[in-house]
Amino acid sequence: MTTLFISDLHLSPNTPEINACFEHFMRTEAIHADALYVLGDLFDFWIGDDDNSDFAAQIRNEFKQLTDAGVPCFFTKGNRDFLVGKRFAKQTGVSLLGDETVINLYGRNAVILHGDTLCTEDVQYLAFRAKVNQPWLQWLFNRLPMAIKTPIVRKIQSDARDTKKSKSLTIMDVTQSEVEKVMLEHKVDLMIHGHTHRPNVHTFSVADQEMTRIVLGDWYEQGSILCFDANNFSLQARPFPSE
Ligand code: LP5
Ligand code: MN
């Protein structure tokens, strides 16, 4: 049996091919898994659990079908879906995780996270993250009507896009010392994250201990999955379904 990890799908009503690939994955693969972990940025942007669009309902339904079938499903929030909340969890049966979680994978402990917090050189982003993660601000935002929330989000997204243009790829990658710090803090030799869209398996040693960092891929061109079983793991791609 296999535990599956995905992240960075960036689903929206404007991504029919990705949505179809996700739906196919949920119905044909995730349904047979030991567990499914979503490590953030499932959505292009999640504006709040009050999203009553057909799109939001469809995605909720995919998770509900999976958890109803008995597959445990876990969700770590990303920088694009930090507003996923308790109502979403209740409606889907998904368990929400904190920023960093240690899980036991067939006898091996691993820390899982979205990955944005590892990019410590991106100080502008981290300052922004701290602001939007203030509970009182989220409480307030969650109570605004869609007609007010939507233009606020559009404006901030556009401002954020502008700032991203001037950032180097190094700034937007993880900082190795932060990776090591987090792994040592949690006493693990395995880390799994997404966010950077640079799928890879990195091995390195710290104080003579062999460490592994697995980076999940995005779903821009194909489905990207980490399949982890008792003996092995692999990063795998799934083609978008043809019409
Ligand atoms: O995901 P990706 O790779 O495109 O970019 C991320 C970082 N960008 C973001 C931007 C958010 O998705 C935008 C979301 C809008 C949310 C509106 C919420 C409404 C209020 C909610 C209140 C509870 O995450 C990007 C990183 C990149 O990853 C790589 O790591 O660099 O970071 C940015 O672009 C952030 C900018 O550097 C700073 C943005 C400043 C914008 C104006 C600030 C206004 C503050 C308002 C606070 C309420
Ligand atoms: Mn991200």
Image: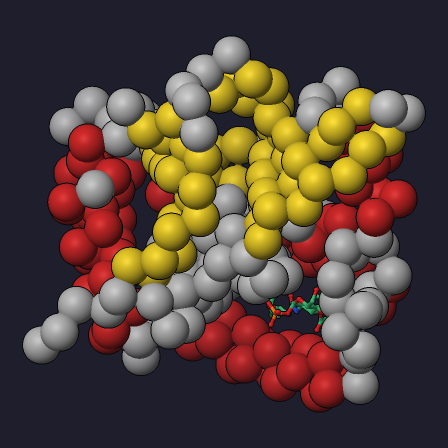
Residue furthest top as drawn: 107
Query: What percent of the width, then of the height, locates residue 33?
Result: 26, 30
Number of numbered labels in the structure image = 0
The foreground one among 75 and 179 is 179
Quadrant in which the N terminus appears = top left
Going 23% across and 51% down the picture, which residue do you hit?
25
Q: Is residue 140 visible?
A: no
Residue 174, located in which quarter of the rendered image? bottom right
Q: As drawn, is 141 to the left or to the right of 118?
A: left
Query: What percent of the width, then of the height, locates residue 180?
Result: 82, 36
Residue 222, located in which quarter of the rendered image? bottom left
Query: What percent of the width, then of the height, locates residue 124?
Result: 84, 68
Going 47% across and 75% down the picture, which residue do you hit?
150
The foreground one among 216 and 147 is 216
Going 38% across and 38% down the picture, which residue do you hit?
227
Residue furthest left as drawn: 243
Residue 182, located in which quarter of the rendered image? top right
Q: As drawn, is 72 to the left or to the right of 25?
A: right
Q: As drawn, is 230 to the left or to the right of 187?
A: left
Q: Is residue 50 above or below residue 184?
A: below
Q: Is residue 238 above or below residue 110?
A: below
Q: Is residue 202 visible?
A: yes
The foreground one among 102 and 150 is 102
Q: Is residue 32 above or below residue 21?
A: above
Q: How is the image coloured?
A: secondary structure
Instruction: Indicate which quadrant contains ligand 1.
Output: bottom right
Quadrant in which the C terminus appears = bottom left
Q: As drawn, is 186 to the left or to the right of 14?
A: right
Going 81% across and 33% down the picture, which residue do you hit?
205
